[in-house]
Image (tube, grey):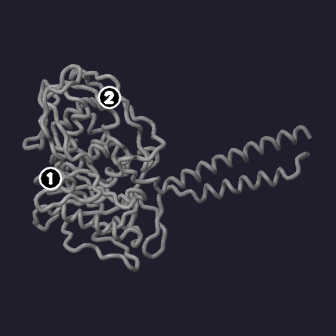
């Protein structure tokens, strides 16, 4: 017999609560559309069904500003980096050549794997395959460079030569491309097809405004990524000695004109980065993030058609201006996914990687570099502080709570059986 009055009641209550929590924990992000209906985005339209529709998608509330006039890009998107809410978009999933904006995926994939002060003597083989007419920072065979040098070459000069050197340090170019494909899949970037790691035109290589925004959001969760992409000017060495000392250097400037300015393009207040690109096939492409008033927005613009000089920068500027004015006055048309286990929670970053002693990696070492991604720090990113979690955070907490309660119910059930045997 049961010698503990109320035990059955406690077991039933715990089981019922656990069951309720399991029921309310959705498998995919849901959001309310303009008609108040809640949807879980299908795989064919990551971020929500509205983002899978052609044309401009925006759901203004009373008092919302009108979208800027003259947006000629074939595809664009403006989103909130903290919440993941997409404020407006045009053909968000349209597959287009990304040019050097694909370097954001390269950085998200490779940057955590290589210590910044690691040295490499670059070989001719490392630079084999750099496309004709590629943008380059000036990496030379037989010269030593640190990983940090090469990343500055990637982000500031869009150097395809620096990408190839880093890919060699990461194992090989084919291995790096395979890792980029896997990372894109893990992030839910279903529109992206990686053929060249540096964004150089290649048959079949495409991405989308949605996917490039995902890569930027994932990158901004890392303090190193944020620091590199927001650097306006730096010195690039002519090589280094065996102990890492520079053998002279020259100045390099970020090619993102919204960051550094140019004739007819003023620097954008609060701009963080992220990456610009151009090829004859892709046209001009741009992913930028800016922070104002505690809010960080990401704007992605692909291939403006107006013919206006610097159109990609002007259209990105107008989208950012509209986004800051419209925040809180529009209903989200979709969400940027933040799949569990793939990116650090936004607004937090991995601690600064320990520099350690300089050590040289020789070109003969071809094994893939191990993943040395450090744990997530428990402090906000000073460079960006873009967010404090995605919609998935609450579901993870609910799921954890349900598991705890289910475990409690199981323990109570075992106690009840033991009491019955004794009674």
Q: Outermost residue, bottom direction?
A: 62
- Picture coordinates of residue 290, whole percent (x, y): 30, 57
Say which residue appears at 13% left-offset and 24% top-offset.
142
Screen quadrant of the N terminus:
top right
Near mark 2 (Cα within 10 A), the count class, few <14, some 14-19 or many ≥20, is some
Cα separation, mark 2 vs mark 1, equals: 30 Å
Q: Position of residue 311 (x, y in %)?
A: 15, 63
Q: Residue at x 66, y 46 (%)?
A: 404
In terms of depth relative to the viewer, which is nearer, 364 or 360?
360
Question: Relative to 397, is 143 above or below?
Answer: above
Residue at the left extreme of this rendering: 133
Query: Considering only order in the chain, which callout, 1 or 2, is on the residue closer to the N terminus?
Result: 1
Identify the residue at horizontal 14%, vertical 52% (top origin): 278
Q: Provide the secondary structure element on which disc 1 rests.
A: strand
Q: Kindly tell me whether residue 376 is visible in this rendering.
A: yes
Residue 115 located left or right of residue 25: left
Is 163 rendered above or below residue 209?
above
Q: Residue 351's x, y, as percent?
A: 41, 37
Q: Residues within 10 Å of mark 1 (few under 14, many from 20)?
A: many
Direction from residue 291 to residue 380 in the image, left or right: right
Which numbered marker is on residue 369? 2
Image position, residue 356 (x, y; %): 35, 25
Q: Residue at x 21, y 47 (%)?
A: 232
Q: Relative to residue 2, is residue 14 drawn left or right?
A: left
- The residue that disc 1 covers is 278
- Image quarter of the C terminus: top right
Residue 191 visible in rendering: no
Asked whether the residues under the numbered discs 2 and 1 touch, taking CB atoms below 8 Å apart as contact, a structural biologist would say no
Residue sitting nearer the eye, 320 or 98: 320
Image label count = 2
Q: Nearer the viewer, residue 248 or 150?
A: 248
């Amino acid at each position: 017999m049961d010698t503990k009055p109320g035990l059955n009641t406690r077991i039933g209550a715990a089981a019922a609560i656990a069951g309720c929590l399991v029921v309310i924990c959705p498998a995919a992000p849901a959001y309310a559309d303009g008609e108040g209906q809640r949807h879980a985005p299908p795989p064919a339209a990551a971020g929500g069904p509205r983002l899978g529709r052609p044309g401009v998608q925006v759901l203004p509330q009373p008092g919302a500003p009108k979208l800027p006039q003259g947006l000629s890009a074939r595809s664009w998107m403006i989103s909130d980096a903290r919440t993941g809410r997409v404020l407006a978009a045009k053909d968000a999933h349209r597959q287009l050549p990304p040019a050097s904006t694909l370097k954001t995926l390269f950085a998200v994939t490779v940057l955590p794997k290589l210590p910044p002060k690691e040295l490499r003597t670059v070989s001719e083989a490392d630079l084999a395959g750099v496309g004709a007419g590629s943008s380059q920072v000036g990496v030379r065979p037989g010269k030593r460079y640190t990983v940090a040098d090469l990343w500055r070459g990637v982000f500031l000069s869009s150097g395809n030569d620096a990408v190839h050197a880093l890919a060699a340090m990461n194992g090989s170019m084919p291995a790096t491309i395979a890792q980029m494909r896997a990372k894109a899949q893990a992030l839910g970037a279903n529109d992206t097809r990686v053929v060249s790691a540096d964004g150089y035109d290649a048959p079949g290589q495409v991405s989308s405004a949605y996917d490039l925004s995902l890569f930027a959001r994932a990158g901004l969760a890392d303090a190193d990524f944020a620091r590199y992409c927001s650097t306006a000017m730096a010195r690039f060495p002519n090589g280094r000695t065996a102990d890492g000392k520079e053998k002279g250097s020259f100045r390099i400037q970020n090619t993102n004109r919204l960051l550094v300015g140019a004739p007819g393009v003023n620097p954008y207040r609060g701009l963080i980065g992220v990456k610009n690109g151009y090829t004859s096939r892709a046209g001009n492409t741009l992913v930028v993030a800016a922070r104002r008033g505690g809010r960080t927005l990401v704007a992605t613009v692909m291939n403006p058609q107006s013919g206006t000089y610097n159109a990609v920068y002007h259209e990105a500027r107008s989208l950012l201006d509209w986004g800051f004015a419209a925040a809180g006055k529009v209903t989200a048309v979709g969400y940027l996914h933040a799949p569990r286990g793939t990116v650090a929670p936004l607004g937090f970053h991995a601690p600064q990687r320990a520099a350690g002693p300089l050590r040289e990696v020789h070109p003969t070492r071809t094994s893939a570099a191990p993943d040395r991604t450090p744990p997530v720090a428990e402090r906000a990113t000073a460079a960006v502080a873009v967010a404090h979690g995605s919609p998935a955070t609450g579901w993870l907490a609910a799921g954890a709570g349900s598991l705890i309660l289910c475990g409690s119910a199981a323990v109570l059930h075992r106690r009840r059986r033991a009491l019955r045997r004794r009674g």
